[in-house]
Amino acid sequence: MKKIILLIFDGLGDRPIKELGGQTPLEAAHTPNLDRLASQGICGTLNAMPENLYPTSEEAHLAILGYDFVKDYPGRGVLEALGAGIKLKPDEMAFRIDFGTVDKDLKLIDPRAGVIESTEKLCKAVDGVEVDGVTFKIYPSLSYRGVLVLSGQPVKNYLKKVRHAAISDTDPHKSGPHKIGVRVLHPKPFGGSKEGKTVARALERYQYLTHEILDEHKINKKRIKKGFPPANFILARGEGRLKPVQSFKDRYGLKAACVAGAPLYKGIASYLGMKVLRVKGATGKLDTNVGAKVKAATKALKNNDFVFMHLKGTDVAAEEYGSAKLKKEFIERADKAFGTLCNLKNVMICVTGDHSTPCALKDHSSDPVPFLINFQFPISNFQSNSNDQNSKVKFGESYCKKGSLGHIYGKDVMSRILGNRD
Ligand code: ZN
């Protein structure tokens, strides 16, 4: 049986861009290796989630890996915590946090505090604080991101009462474009129980208290002097708790490993029981060492049946910078490193994205993403009624739209991959 590499470019899909001659970044990119993979396989398009839902990365990944993105979803906070290597207990709550910048009325100025490089020292200043019996542990993650873990008797009391995500976001990330000018939200317990109100109130107090500490912190004073926005507010979202889930191995009989840089994706893999590999130079950013990741994935195939490899750069270029040029360049750089992948024997390579992130939107969208399953031998990709039988193979949105795989949803991905495996 062939081994499998599932390569997910985060936010891969895009829309035609004028500066790129009406092509998308993927179409405009020079990608001989991806094109070769496409020419020796079948293509199609994918919506990991139903089009009427906003495709978050975490839910889209769960769907692609064949899980129920509602029932099996433990909350973003849990996935971030697992990805950061935090040993979460079932009676704790975890939030994903972003360090943001707010004004004196707590209105958002910058949800990423100028994409601050590191918050390690700032986290130290607000870690281990106890408010109304709730202890707040804070862990820095990539750049402005982090994890907030709540524990203590009030949390235990509340978790006994609820089964799913229980405290609403304080990060107004769903309000309008880029959330600017919106006041941070009041956390509320779903269902409004007495126990929930106690925890939500403690969280709000913790956020106000830490806002004062962060505002006065010397790192932020220095940032203001240099003209950078201060990281003066902890924006919490995606509250979750550990919940039991069937492992990837038990579900598919495939021993799986993960090669990723960004903690969220390591967290998803870890949650599903995949072995998460440490790869030097895998940063989860634009500067990630794709070659090192390819090497790690290739090595991992020796002891595993399935390797999930994740590249975040495409999404970073589009969502943080809105730059088609950066997105195109990242794809080209990644493609260069794929040469050895294309030459692997007895390996099925599948390439797709979790969702589209059009540079023009600087946000995720439900535009379908290209999808390919490589068979290592030439195959007619087009449906028999297509007029494009002889056109050049170019892995991209337009080409894949005409592919014989058609349009599929996340829940179909694993069955399509396994159904074509030999
Ligand atoms: Zn994503």
Image (cartoon, rainbow, N blue to C red):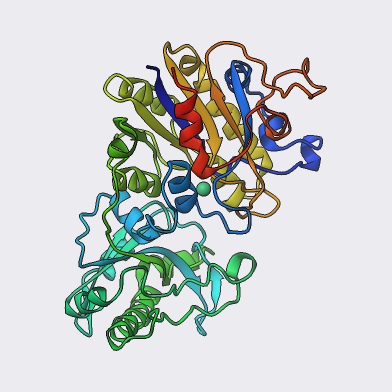
Q: Is residue 308 left or right of residue 314?
A: left
Q: Is residue 386 left or right of residue 98?
A: right
Q: Residue at the spot x=20%, y=75% of the render?
A: 156
Q: Residue at the spot x=49%, y=23% of the render?
A: 420
Q: Nearer the viewer, residue 96 or 44?
A: 44
The relative height of residue 137 versus residue 401 in the rendered view (above or below) is below
- Displayed quadrant of residue 74: bottom left
The relative height of residue 27 versus residue 123 in the rendered view (above or below) is above
Furthest residue toward bottom? 194
Task: Locate the C terminus and report the quarter of the image it occupies.
Answer: top left
Q: Is residue 134 left or right of residue 257?
A: left
- Displayed quadrant of residue 388: top right
Residue 312 placement (x, y as % from top left):
49, 42
The relative height of residue 221 versus residue 286 in the rendered view (above or below) is below
The relative height of residue 356 versus residue 73 in the rendered view (above or below) is above
Q: Nearer the viewer, residue 184 or 152?
A: 152
Residue 188 placement (x, y as % from top left):
41, 81
From this viewpoint, is residue 51 visible?
Answer: yes
From this viewpoint, is residue 279 visible?
Answer: no
Q: Is residue 177 left or right of residue 120?
A: right
Task: Locate the N terminus and report the quarter of the image it occupies.
Answer: top left
Furthest residue toward left? 153
Q: Nearer the viewer, residue 254 or 314?
A: 254
- Displayed quadrant of residue 124: bottom left
